[in-house]
Amino acid sequence: MTRENLTTTTVNFLCIIMIFIILIINNNTNNINNTNNTNNINNTNNINNINNTNNINNINNTNNINNTNNINNTNNIL
């Protein structure tokens, strides 16, 4: 093998290694992004759950107001 051929072979080999490293880094980045997306969905679900709880509380508050009105009506009858 001449010196030029050895140099060309070495450079080609290093290029292949670099390509593999880039592919591995890109795959890891995609995995991180997928995890973040899942976390975002979970966070949205948590917010929706809080909103649902608030809605239930609002219904309960409305019922309480209605119950108070019923008591007032009884007083009026008395």
Image (cartoon, grey):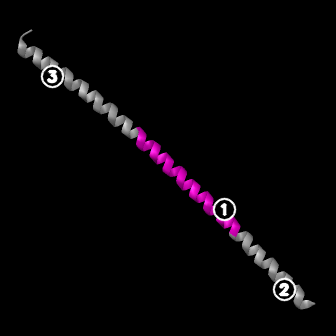
Up the image or down, 48 lies above or below 25; here it is below
Q: Which residue is mark 3?
A: 11
* Residue at the image point whose x is 89% and y is 85% from the top: 74
Q: Which residue is mark 1?
A: 53
Quarter-of-image position of residue 25: top left
Query: Separation of disc 1 and disc 3 at Cα?
Result: 63 Å
Q: Which residue is mark 2?
A: 72
How far across and how far down the image is residue 78, in percent?
93, 90
Q: Which range is magenta?
A: 31-57
| Magenta stretch contains residue 34 | yes
Q: Amino acid at mark 3?
A: Val
Q: Residues within 10 Å of mark 2 (few under 14, many from 20)?
A: few
Disc 3, SS: helix
| Magenta stretch contains residue 44 | yes
Query: Separation of disc 2 and disc 3 at Cα?
Result: 91 Å
Quarter-of-image position of residue 9: top left
Q: 59 or 75: which is nearer to us?
A: 75
